[in-house]
Image (cartoon, coloured by chain):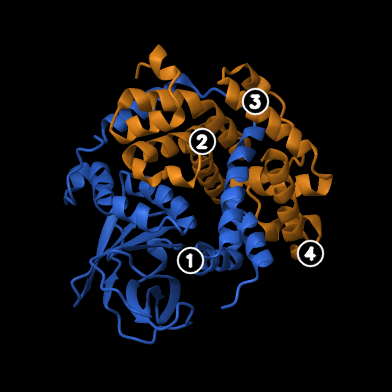
Amino acid sequence: MVGDTAAVAESDPELVRRVQAGDREAFTELYRRFAPAAYGLALRVLRQPGLAQDVVHDAFAAIWGAPEIYDQARGAFRSFLLSLVHHRAVDVVRREERLRDRERRVNLEPPPNEDWGEAVFEAADLADRRREVRRALAELSPEQREVIELAYFQGYTQVRIAAERGIPLGTVKTRTLAAMRKLRSLLS
Amino acid sequence: MSWDHERVEELLAGHVLGALDTEDAELAERALVEHVPGCERCASALHDLRSIAGDLALAAPAVAPSPALEGRLRATIEGVPLRRRTPWLVGAAAAAAVAVAGLSGWNVTLAGRLSEAETRQAWLADAVSAFGHPDAEVLQLEGSSRARINVWFVRGEQRMYLVASNMEHPGEDVYKVWVVDGDTAHGEGSFVPEDGVGMVPVNVGPSEVDLVMVTREAVSDGPTPTASPIASATFAPAG
Protein backbone atom coordinates (compact mmCIF):
# COMPACT_ATOMS: atom_id res chain seq x y z
CA MET A 1 0.00 0.00 0.00
CA VAL A 2 2.17 2.76 -1.23
CA GLY A 3 0.70 6.16 -1.93
CA ASP A 4 2.36 8.53 -4.33
CA THR A 5 2.61 12.25 -4.66
CA ALA A 6 0.38 12.40 -7.70
CA ALA A 7 -2.40 10.52 -5.96
CA VAL A 8 -2.42 12.96 -3.05
CA ALA A 9 -3.60 15.76 -5.31
CA GLU A 10 -6.38 13.74 -6.90
CA SER A 11 -9.96 14.64 -6.19
CA ASP A 12 -12.13 12.32 -4.14
CA PRO A 13 -14.36 11.38 -7.09
CA GLU A 14 -11.36 10.45 -9.18
CA LEU A 15 -9.94 8.31 -6.41
CA VAL A 16 -13.29 6.63 -5.94
CA ARG A 17 -13.51 5.89 -9.65
CA ARG A 18 -10.10 4.26 -9.50
CA VAL A 19 -11.12 2.22 -6.48
CA GLN A 20 -14.23 1.08 -8.32
CA ALA A 21 -11.94 -0.07 -11.11
CA GLY A 22 -9.95 -2.15 -8.63
CA ASP A 23 -6.97 0.14 -8.05
CA ARG A 24 -5.39 -0.76 -4.71
CA GLU A 25 -3.13 2.31 -4.64
CA ALA A 26 -6.15 4.54 -4.99
CA PHE A 27 -7.81 2.64 -2.18
CA THR A 28 -4.75 3.20 -0.01
CA GLU A 29 -4.83 6.90 -0.79
CA LEU A 30 -8.51 7.08 -0.01
CA TYR A 31 -7.89 5.28 3.26
CA ARG A 32 -5.07 7.62 4.25
CA ARG A 33 -7.14 10.63 3.33
CA PHE A 34 -10.13 9.71 5.43
CA ALA A 35 -8.97 7.23 8.05
CA PRO A 36 -8.23 9.91 10.69
CA ALA A 37 -11.70 11.41 10.32
CA ALA A 38 -13.31 7.97 10.28
CA TYR A 39 -11.33 6.71 13.26
CA GLY A 40 -11.86 9.92 15.19
CA LEU A 41 -15.59 9.56 14.71
CA ALA A 42 -15.63 5.88 15.64
CA LEU A 43 -13.50 6.54 18.70
CA ARG A 44 -15.76 9.37 19.77
CA VAL A 45 -18.81 7.12 19.60
CA LEU A 46 -17.27 3.92 20.93
CA ARG A 47 -14.49 5.20 23.22
CA GLN A 48 -12.63 1.96 22.78
CA PRO A 49 -9.76 1.96 20.29
CA GLY A 50 -10.10 -1.72 19.43
CA LEU A 51 -13.77 -1.49 18.60
CA ALA A 52 -13.24 1.77 16.77
CA GLN A 53 -10.55 0.22 14.60
CA ASP A 54 -12.84 -2.72 13.85
CA VAL A 55 -15.52 -0.34 12.66
CA VAL A 56 -13.12 1.60 10.44
CA HIS A 57 -11.72 -1.63 9.07
CA ASP A 58 -15.17 -2.98 8.26
CA ALA A 59 -16.25 0.23 6.59
CA PHE A 60 -13.25 0.43 4.29
CA ALA A 61 -13.34 -3.30 3.62
CA ALA A 62 -16.98 -3.00 2.62
CA ILE A 63 -16.15 -0.20 0.21
CA TRP A 64 -13.38 -2.25 -1.36
CA GLY A 65 -15.48 -5.40 -1.54
CA ALA A 66 -18.49 -3.72 -3.10
CA PRO A 67 -17.68 -0.17 -4.18
CA GLU A 68 -21.01 0.05 -5.94
CA ILE A 69 -22.59 0.74 -2.57
CA TYR A 70 -21.43 4.33 -3.02
CA ASP A 71 -23.46 6.29 -5.52
CA GLN A 72 -21.89 9.62 -6.37
CA ALA A 73 -25.27 11.08 -7.26
CA ARG A 74 -26.26 10.87 -3.62
CA GLY A 75 -23.55 13.12 -2.28
CA ALA A 76 -19.88 13.37 -1.42
CA PHE A 77 -17.87 10.27 -0.73
CA ARG A 78 -16.75 11.72 2.59
CA SER A 79 -20.33 12.03 3.78
CA PHE A 80 -21.09 8.52 2.63
CA LEU A 81 -18.04 7.02 4.31
CA LEU A 82 -18.55 8.85 7.58
CA SER A 83 -22.25 7.96 7.60
CA LEU A 84 -21.27 4.35 7.10
CA VAL A 85 -18.76 4.52 9.95
CA HIS A 86 -21.30 6.23 12.15
CA HIS A 87 -23.97 3.65 11.38
CA ARG A 88 -21.62 0.81 12.23
CA ALA A 89 -20.32 2.52 15.36
CA VAL A 90 -23.81 3.17 16.69
CA ASP A 91 -24.76 -0.40 15.92
CA VAL A 92 -21.79 -1.65 17.91
CA VAL A 93 -22.26 0.71 20.81
CA ARG A 94 -25.84 -0.40 21.22
CA ARG A 95 -24.78 -4.01 21.30
CA GLU A 96 -22.03 -3.52 23.78
CA GLU A 97 -23.64 -3.40 27.16
CA ARG A 98 -20.45 -2.54 28.85
CA LEU A 99 -20.22 0.68 26.91
CA ARG A 100 -23.48 1.87 28.35
CA ASP A 101 -21.74 2.72 31.55
CA ARG A 102 -19.26 4.93 29.84
CA GLU A 103 -19.04 8.52 30.77
CA ARG A 104 -22.09 10.31 29.48
CA ARG A 105 -20.83 13.56 28.24
CA VAL A 106 -23.15 16.18 26.97
CA ASN A 107 -20.78 18.64 25.38
CA LEU A 108 -18.92 18.56 22.13
CA GLU A 109 -15.44 19.07 23.47
CA PRO A 110 -13.06 16.16 22.92
CA PRO A 111 -12.75 13.87 25.93
CA PRO A 112 -9.53 14.20 27.95
CA ASN A 113 -6.49 12.56 26.39
CA GLU A 114 -8.19 12.26 23.04
CA ASP A 115 -7.28 15.64 21.68
CA TRP A 116 -4.24 14.38 19.88
CA GLY A 117 -6.19 14.38 16.67
CA GLU A 118 -5.48 18.01 15.97
CA ALA A 119 -1.92 17.02 15.13
CA VAL A 120 -3.16 14.80 12.32
CA PHE A 121 -2.50 16.16 8.87
CA GLU A 122 -5.62 16.82 6.89
CA ALA A 123 -6.25 18.38 3.54
CA ALA A 124 -7.02 22.09 3.84
CA ASP A 125 -10.61 21.75 2.69
CA LEU A 126 -11.34 19.05 5.24
CA ALA A 127 -9.73 21.06 8.05
CA ASP A 128 -11.70 24.15 6.98
CA ARG A 129 -14.95 22.22 6.98
CA ARG A 130 -14.14 20.85 10.41
CA ARG A 131 -13.83 24.37 11.76
CA GLU A 132 -17.08 25.40 10.10
CA VAL A 133 -18.94 22.46 11.62
CA ARG A 134 -17.66 23.23 15.09
CA ARG A 135 -18.61 26.87 14.75
CA ALA A 136 -22.08 25.90 13.58
CA LEU A 137 -22.56 23.52 16.49
CA ALA A 138 -21.51 26.24 18.88
CA GLU A 139 -24.33 28.41 17.57
CA LEU A 140 -27.02 25.88 18.49
CA SER A 141 -28.89 26.39 21.72
CA PRO A 142 -27.65 24.17 24.57
CA GLU A 143 -30.84 22.11 24.32
CA GLN A 144 -30.44 21.59 20.59
CA ARG A 145 -26.75 20.74 20.95
CA GLU A 146 -27.54 18.21 23.64
CA VAL A 147 -29.97 16.20 21.53
CA ILE A 148 -27.50 16.14 18.64
CA GLU A 149 -24.68 15.09 20.94
CA LEU A 150 -26.64 12.33 22.61
CA ALA A 151 -28.08 11.00 19.38
CA TYR A 152 -25.13 11.25 17.07
CA PHE A 153 -22.11 10.82 19.28
CA GLN A 154 -23.51 8.65 22.02
CA GLY A 155 -25.84 6.52 19.97
CA TYR A 156 -28.95 7.26 22.01
CA THR A 157 -32.32 6.78 20.42
CA GLN A 158 -34.73 9.66 20.71
CA VAL A 159 -36.83 7.56 23.08
CA ARG A 160 -33.86 7.11 25.36
CA ILE A 161 -32.99 10.79 25.25
CA ALA A 162 -36.54 11.64 26.28
CA ALA A 163 -36.46 9.13 29.12
CA GLU A 164 -33.06 10.12 30.46
CA ARG A 165 -33.63 13.85 30.19
CA GLY A 166 -37.21 13.68 31.44
CA ILE A 167 -38.66 15.52 28.47
CA PRO A 168 -41.44 14.50 26.08
CA LEU A 169 -40.45 12.50 23.03
CA GLY A 170 -42.11 15.09 20.85
CA THR A 171 -39.82 17.74 22.29
CA VAL A 172 -36.78 15.66 21.45
CA LYS A 173 -37.98 15.29 17.88
CA THR A 174 -38.77 18.97 17.54
CA ARG A 175 -35.42 20.01 18.94
CA THR A 176 -33.61 17.58 16.68
CA LEU A 177 -35.28 18.89 13.56
CA ALA A 178 -34.75 22.50 14.63
CA ALA A 179 -31.08 21.78 15.27
CA MET A 180 -30.61 20.09 11.91
CA ARG A 181 -32.36 22.93 10.12
CA LYS A 182 -30.16 25.50 11.83
CA LEU A 183 -27.05 23.51 10.96
CA ARG A 184 -28.26 23.30 7.38
CA SER A 185 -28.65 27.06 7.17
CA LEU A 186 -25.27 27.65 8.80
CA LEU A 187 -23.37 25.12 6.73
CA SER A 188 -24.96 25.49 3.34
CA MET B 1 -51.27 6.63 3.88
CA SER B 2 -51.18 10.39 3.77
CA TRP B 3 -47.86 11.96 4.68
CA ASP B 4 -47.32 15.26 6.43
CA HIS B 5 -44.14 16.91 5.16
CA GLU B 6 -43.17 18.32 8.54
CA ARG B 7 -43.63 14.95 10.18
CA VAL B 8 -41.64 13.25 7.45
CA GLU B 9 -38.79 15.71 7.81
CA GLU B 10 -38.81 15.12 11.55
CA LEU B 11 -38.51 11.40 10.91
CA LEU B 12 -35.75 11.93 8.38
CA ALA B 13 -33.78 14.06 10.83
CA GLY B 14 -33.86 11.24 13.36
CA HIS B 15 -33.16 8.72 10.64
CA VAL B 16 -29.96 10.33 9.36
CA LEU B 17 -28.72 10.58 12.95
CA GLY B 18 -29.47 6.90 13.52
CA ALA B 19 -31.62 7.90 16.48
CA LEU B 20 -35.01 6.41 15.73
CA ASP B 21 -36.45 3.66 17.85
CA THR B 22 -38.01 0.65 16.15
CA GLU B 23 -41.46 2.09 15.63
CA ASP B 24 -40.28 5.36 14.14
CA ALA B 25 -37.60 3.60 12.13
CA GLU B 26 -40.25 1.48 10.48
CA LEU B 27 -42.34 4.56 9.80
CA ALA B 28 -39.32 6.35 8.35
CA GLU B 29 -38.64 3.38 6.13
CA ARG B 30 -42.17 3.50 4.81
CA ALA B 31 -41.84 7.20 4.16
CA LEU B 32 -38.56 6.61 2.34
CA VAL B 33 -40.16 4.05 0.11
CA GLU B 34 -43.67 5.39 -0.32
CA HIS B 35 -43.37 9.17 -0.11
CA VAL B 36 -39.92 10.69 -0.34
CA PRO B 37 -39.00 9.55 -3.86
CA GLY B 38 -42.04 11.33 -5.26
CA CYS B 39 -41.92 14.42 -3.06
CA GLU B 40 -39.47 17.08 -4.17
CA ARG B 41 -39.61 18.89 -0.84
CA CYS B 42 -38.89 15.83 1.29
CA ALA B 43 -36.30 14.43 -1.15
CA SER B 44 -34.45 17.73 -0.99
CA ALA B 45 -34.70 17.75 2.80
CA LEU B 46 -33.30 14.22 2.93
CA HIS B 47 -30.38 15.16 0.73
CA ASP B 48 -29.55 18.12 2.95
CA LEU B 49 -30.01 16.18 6.19
CA ARG B 50 -27.71 13.42 4.99
CA SER B 51 -25.10 15.98 4.13
CA ILE B 52 -25.39 17.61 7.55
CA ALA B 53 -25.15 14.23 9.28
CA GLY B 54 -22.00 13.49 7.30
CA ASP B 55 -20.54 16.82 8.34
CA LEU B 56 -21.38 16.23 12.00
CA ALA B 57 -18.71 13.57 12.01
CA LEU B 58 -16.17 16.34 11.65
CA ALA B 59 -17.04 17.67 15.10
CA ALA B 60 -15.09 14.73 16.47
CA PRO B 61 -11.34 15.30 16.45
CA ALA B 62 -9.41 13.52 13.73
CA VAL B 63 -7.33 10.75 15.23
CA ALA B 64 -4.71 8.74 13.38
CA PRO B 65 -5.45 5.04 13.77
CA SER B 66 -2.69 2.60 14.54
CA PRO B 67 -0.48 1.86 11.52
CA ALA B 68 -1.37 -1.77 12.13
CA LEU B 69 -4.89 -1.04 10.93
CA GLU B 70 -3.62 -0.22 7.45
CA GLY B 71 -1.75 -3.52 7.38
CA ARG B 72 -4.82 -5.38 8.54
CA LEU B 73 -6.92 -3.72 5.89
CA ARG B 74 -4.33 -4.53 3.25
CA ALA B 75 -4.48 -8.18 4.23
CA THR B 76 -8.26 -8.07 4.01
CA ILE B 77 -8.49 -6.51 0.57
CA GLU B 78 -5.84 -8.80 -0.83
CA GLY B 79 -8.24 -11.61 -0.02
CA VAL B 80 -11.02 -9.87 -1.91
CA PRO B 81 -9.95 -9.50 -5.52
CA LEU B 82 -12.17 -6.74 -6.85
CA ARG B 83 -13.60 -7.34 -10.31
CA ARG B 84 -12.49 -10.93 -10.32
CA ARG B 85 -15.46 -12.25 -8.45
CA THR B 86 -16.69 -15.74 -9.03
CA PRO B 87 -20.47 -15.91 -9.34
CA TRP B 88 -22.24 -17.63 -6.56
CA LEU B 89 -19.90 -20.41 -5.71
CA VAL B 90 -20.65 -22.81 -2.94
CA GLY B 91 -17.64 -23.69 -0.86
CA ALA B 92 -16.99 -23.30 2.79
CA ALA B 93 -13.25 -23.00 2.31
CA ALA B 94 -13.61 -19.63 0.67
CA ALA B 95 -16.57 -18.45 2.68
CA ALA B 96 -15.63 -14.80 2.97
CA ALA B 97 -14.66 -14.35 -0.65
CA VAL B 98 -17.65 -16.30 -1.81
CA ALA B 99 -19.90 -14.19 0.31
CA VAL B 100 -18.73 -11.00 -1.31
CA ALA B 101 -18.83 -12.63 -4.71
CA GLY B 102 -22.38 -13.71 -4.14
CA LEU B 103 -23.25 -10.19 -3.19
CA SER B 104 -21.70 -8.66 -6.25
CA GLY B 105 -23.99 -10.55 -8.56
CA TRP B 106 -26.97 -8.54 -7.53
CA ASN B 107 -25.39 -5.59 -5.88
CA VAL B 108 -24.80 -3.59 -9.03
CA THR B 109 -28.45 -3.80 -9.87
CA LEU B 110 -29.65 -3.49 -6.33
CA ALA B 111 -27.59 -0.49 -5.36
CA GLY B 112 -28.74 1.33 -8.44
CA ARG B 113 -32.37 0.33 -8.36
CA LEU B 114 -32.97 0.97 -4.71
CA SER B 115 -31.22 4.29 -4.62
CA GLU B 116 -34.42 6.09 -3.70
CA ALA B 117 -34.71 4.16 -0.49
CA GLU B 118 -31.91 5.78 1.40
CA THR B 119 -31.92 3.41 4.30
CA ARG B 120 -30.90 0.65 2.00
CA GLN B 121 -27.58 2.37 1.66
CA ALA B 122 -26.89 1.58 5.26
CA TRP B 123 -28.35 -1.89 4.94
CA LEU B 124 -26.22 -2.64 1.96
CA ALA B 125 -23.08 -1.46 3.63
CA ASP B 126 -23.96 -3.39 6.74
CA ALA B 127 -24.81 -6.41 4.67
CA VAL B 128 -21.50 -6.28 2.87
CA SER B 129 -19.73 -6.56 6.17
CA ALA B 130 -21.99 -9.39 7.25
CA PHE B 131 -21.49 -11.25 4.00
CA GLY B 132 -17.76 -10.80 4.29
CA HIS B 133 -17.76 -12.33 7.73
CA PRO B 134 -15.74 -15.54 7.77
CA ASP B 135 -18.57 -17.30 9.61
CA ALA B 136 -21.32 -16.14 7.28
CA GLU B 137 -23.84 -18.83 6.41
CA VAL B 138 -26.51 -18.86 3.79
CA LEU B 139 -29.90 -20.57 3.98
CA GLN B 140 -31.77 -21.10 0.74
CA LEU B 141 -35.54 -20.89 0.88
CA GLU B 142 -37.40 -23.61 -0.98
CA GLY B 143 -40.55 -22.95 -2.98
CA SER B 144 -42.36 -23.63 -6.17
CA SER B 145 -41.46 -20.43 -7.97
CA ARG B 146 -38.31 -19.83 -9.97
CA ALA B 147 -37.26 -17.19 -7.47
CA ARG B 148 -33.98 -17.61 -5.66
CA ILE B 149 -34.32 -16.47 -2.07
CA ASN B 150 -31.49 -16.72 0.43
CA VAL B 151 -31.02 -15.61 4.01
CA TRP B 152 -27.50 -14.60 5.01
CA PHE B 153 -26.63 -14.76 8.66
CA VAL B 154 -23.87 -15.12 11.21
CA ARG B 155 -24.70 -17.19 14.27
CA GLY B 156 -24.63 -15.05 17.37
CA GLU B 157 -25.52 -11.90 15.45
CA GLN B 158 -28.92 -10.29 15.83
CA ARG B 159 -29.44 -9.42 12.21
CA MET B 160 -29.88 -11.39 9.01
CA TYR B 161 -30.41 -10.36 5.40
CA LEU B 162 -32.92 -11.84 3.01
CA VAL B 163 -31.88 -11.47 -0.60
CA ALA B 164 -34.26 -12.42 -3.39
CA SER B 165 -33.71 -12.59 -7.12
CA ASN B 166 -35.71 -13.79 -10.13
CA MET B 167 -38.80 -12.50 -8.38
CA GLU B 168 -41.97 -12.07 -10.35
CA HIS B 169 -43.34 -8.53 -10.03
CA PRO B 170 -46.28 -8.71 -7.61
CA GLY B 171 -48.36 -6.02 -9.32
CA GLU B 172 -50.21 -4.06 -6.67
CA ASP B 173 -49.13 -6.52 -3.98
CA VAL B 174 -45.89 -6.75 -2.01
CA TYR B 175 -43.70 -9.58 -0.88
CA LYS B 176 -43.49 -9.85 2.87
CA VAL B 177 -40.85 -11.58 4.95
CA TRP B 178 -41.95 -13.42 8.08
CA VAL B 179 -40.01 -15.13 10.81
CA VAL B 180 -41.81 -17.84 12.69
CA ASP B 181 -41.08 -18.68 16.30
CA GLY B 182 -43.18 -21.61 17.45
CA ASP B 183 -46.64 -20.86 16.09
CA THR B 184 -46.21 -17.09 15.93
CA ALA B 185 -45.26 -15.27 12.76
CA HIS B 186 -43.68 -11.82 12.90
CA GLY B 187 -43.48 -9.56 9.89
CA GLU B 188 -39.94 -8.41 9.24
CA GLY B 189 -40.42 -6.14 6.28
CA SER B 190 -41.75 -6.11 2.79
CA PHE B 191 -40.42 -5.37 -0.65
CA VAL B 192 -41.40 -4.90 -4.23
CA PRO B 193 -38.63 -6.29 -6.42
CA GLU B 194 -37.05 -4.15 -9.07
CA ASP B 195 -35.61 -6.03 -11.99
CA GLY B 196 -36.60 -9.10 -10.02
CA VAL B 197 -34.35 -8.23 -7.09
CA GLY B 198 -35.20 -7.35 -3.51
CA MET B 199 -33.58 -7.28 -0.12
CA VAL B 200 -34.88 -7.04 3.43
CA PRO B 201 -32.89 -6.85 6.66
CA VAL B 202 -34.26 -9.15 9.35
CA ASN B 203 -33.68 -7.79 12.81
CA VAL B 204 -33.50 -11.04 14.73
CA GLY B 205 -30.80 -13.66 14.99
CA PRO B 206 -31.01 -17.19 13.57
CA SER B 207 -31.22 -18.72 17.03
CA GLU B 208 -34.43 -16.84 17.78
CA VAL B 209 -36.55 -18.22 14.97
CA ASP B 210 -37.56 -21.61 13.68
CA LEU B 211 -38.57 -20.69 10.18
CA VAL B 212 -38.34 -17.85 7.70
CA MET B 213 -40.80 -17.48 4.86
CA VAL B 214 -41.99 -15.09 2.18
CA THR B 215 -45.61 -14.49 1.25
CA ARG B 216 -47.32 -12.29 -1.28
CA GLU B 217 -49.61 -9.82 0.47
CA ALA B 218 -52.04 -7.10 -0.53
CA VAL B 219 -50.76 -4.76 2.20
CA SER B 220 -47.31 -4.32 3.65
CA ASP B 221 -48.34 -3.89 7.27
CA GLY B 222 -50.71 -6.78 7.84
CA PRO B 223 -50.17 -8.44 11.24
CA THR B 224 -50.34 -12.03 10.04
CA PRO B 225 -49.75 -13.87 6.76
CA THR B 226 -52.83 -14.10 4.56
CA ALA B 227 -51.39 -16.36 1.87
CA SER B 228 -49.39 -19.53 1.63
CA PRO B 229 -45.65 -18.97 1.53
CA ILE B 230 -44.02 -18.80 -1.88
CA ALA B 231 -40.81 -19.99 -0.23
CA SER B 232 -39.65 -21.00 3.22
CA ALA B 233 -36.79 -22.62 5.08
CA THR B 234 -36.15 -23.99 8.54
CA PHE B 235 -33.10 -23.04 10.54
CA ALA B 236 -30.97 -25.97 11.59
CA PRO B 237 -29.38 -25.88 15.04
CA ALA B 238 -25.80 -24.63 15.22
CA GLY B 239 -23.07 -27.15 14.69
In which quadrant is the C terminus of chain B drawn? bottom left
The amino acid sitting under disc 1 is: Val
Q: Position of residue B92 (x, y in %)?
A: 20, 47
Q: Which residue is mark 1?
A: B33
Secondary structure of the residue carrying tag 1 is helix
Which residue is at the front of the view, A35 or B118? B118
- Percent from the top left, x then y, of residue A108? 74, 36
Using the image, name the chain to which the residue with label 3 belongs. A
- Distance (Cα) linking label 3 and label 1: 36 Å
Q: Taking A185 as reference, is B34 above or below it?
A: below
Residue type marked 4: Pro
Q: Report which residue position mark 3 lands on.
A: A128
Q: Earlier in the sequence, mark 3 or mark 4?
A: 3
Disc 1 and disc 4 on one polypeptide chain:
no
Q: Is residue B154 visible?
A: no
* Chain ID, orange in image: A
Residue A125 horizontal/vertical position (percent): 59, 25
Compared with A150, B116 (above or below) is below
On the same chain, marks 3 and 1? The answer is no
The quadrant in which residue B163 appears is bottom left
Nearer to us: label 1 or label 4:
1
The residue wearing badge 2 is: A78
**Which numbered disc covers residue A168?**
4
Label 2 in the same subunit as label 4: yes
Q: Nearer the viewer, mark 2 or mark 4?
A: 2
| Residue appearing at x 49%, y 42% in the figure | A80
CB atoms at circles 1 and 4 under 8 Å apart?
Answer: no
Q: Split into 4 quadrants, where in the image is the N terminus of chain B?
A: bottom right
Q: Amino acid at mark 2?
A: Arg
Which disc number belongs to residue B156? none
